[in-house]
Image (cartoon, rainbow, N blue to C red):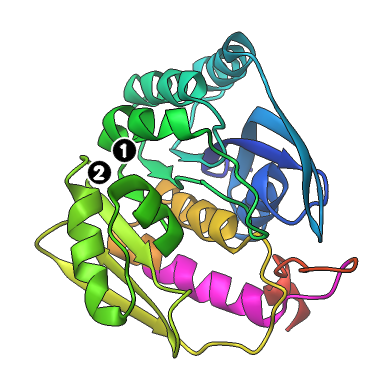
């Protein structure tokens, strides 16, 4: 039996199973790659919000990463919740020494509006992590956190992309899901543009969309796809997952990572 492509997620744990490490590994399994994990923080969270978060020591994060990469190897790395400046800088250094594409999801707040990144870590995100990213995948709130640019309409996505690219990622995917109308995203490297559109589903159960999308992109890159190919396929996967999102608990439920198996 051939070994599937290997993808490493470096992110926080979501005890409710909708986002974070749990969503990443479900996505990777659904897309046919072998998922591995480096846990950066543990959260106590459910469908209503984040009740607490505890970051792991830098040494623990570094040891997890090295133990996986040095023995098993990776074809792509994906980052999520990194919590602090110290963790951001440590992970950036680790990725910089790894010969594999990196998808950086600059997680700043949860779906419920809970902060997942210390304000002091924003500069490290800009100067250390974004420069080693193959693809950065900020949503509009994260664009504002990182650059100060506020996007009110589809026309503002280009300005947002330019502002993020100025910090050094090779590609940026600006996620326009918070805008009215169709769900439109802009993928660009500063010269080449790809506009990705999908119908907006009337479903509020969207917990884990950002984690799922970034993990799906990493899965595509691990398979050897180009960035535009990987992002296009990931957009289709997450659109189906959103359509299949289901109620869980009393708040915002998760997307359905296994939607293709239920068709």
The residue lying furthest to the left in this view is 191
| Left or right: residue 100 compared with residue 257 | left
- Answer few, some or many: residues within 10 Å of disc 1's Cα (few below 14, many 20 plus, some between 14 and 19): many
Helix, strand or loop at label 2? It is: loop
Task: Judge whether residue 237 is colored magenta.
Answer: yes
Q: Indicate the quadrant containing the N terminus: top left, top right, bottom left or bottom right.
A: top right
Q: Where is residue 134 in the image (x, y as percent from the top left)?
A: 30, 44
- Where's the C terminus, which quadrant? bottom right
Magenta stretch: helix, strand or loop mostly = helix
> Gap in Å between the C-alphas at discs 1 and 2?
5 Å
23 vs 114, nearest the viewer: 114
The picture quadrant where one finds residue 127 is: top left
Give the numbered dot on residue 169. Answer: 2
Residue 137 visible: no
Q: What is the span of residues highlighted in magenta in the rendered image? A: 232-248
Q: Evaluate whether residue 141 shows in this view.
A: yes
- The answer to whether residue 235 is left or right of residue 226 is right
Q: Which residue is drawn at 63% across and 35% down?
A: 36
Residue 40 at x, y percent in the picture: 63, 28
Q: Does the residue at mark 1 contact the one at mark 2 (Cβ under 8 Å)?
A: yes
Q: 262 and 171: which one is in front?
A: 171
The correct choice, above or below, for 121 with respect to 115 in the image is above
């Amino acid at each position: 039996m051939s070994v599937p492509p290997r993808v490493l997620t470096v992110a926080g744990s979501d005890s409710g199973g909708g986002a974070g490490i749990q969503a990443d590994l479900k996505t990777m399994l659904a897309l046919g790659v072998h998922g591995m994990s480096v846990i950066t923080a543990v959260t106590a969270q459910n469908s209503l919000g984040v009740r607490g978060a505890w970051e792991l020591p830098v040494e623990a994060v570094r040891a997890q990463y090295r133990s996986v990469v040095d023995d098993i190897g990776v074809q792509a790395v994906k980052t999520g919740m990194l919590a602090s400046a110290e963790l951001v800088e440590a992970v950036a250094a680790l990725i910089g020494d790894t010969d594999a594409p990196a998808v950086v999801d600059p997680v700043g707040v949860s779906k419920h509006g809970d902060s997942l990144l210390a304000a002091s870590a924003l500069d490290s995100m800009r100067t250390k992590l974004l420069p080693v990213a193959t693809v950065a995948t900020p949503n509009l709130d994260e664009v504002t956190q990182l650059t100060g640019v506020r996007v009110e309409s589809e026309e503002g996505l280009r300005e947002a992309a330019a502002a993020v690219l100025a910090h050094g990622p090779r590609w940026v995917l600006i996620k326009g899901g918070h805008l009215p109308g169709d769900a439109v995203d802009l993928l660009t490297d500063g010269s080449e543009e790809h506009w990705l559109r999908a119908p907006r589903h009337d479903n509020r159960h969207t917990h884990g969309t950002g984690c799922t999308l970034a993990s799906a992109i990493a899965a595509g890159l691990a398979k050897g796809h180009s960035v535009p190919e990987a992002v296009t396929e990931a957009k289709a996967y997450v659109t189906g997952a959103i359509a299949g999102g289901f109620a869980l608990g009393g708040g915002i439920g998760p997307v359905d990572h296994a939607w293709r198996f239920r068709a």
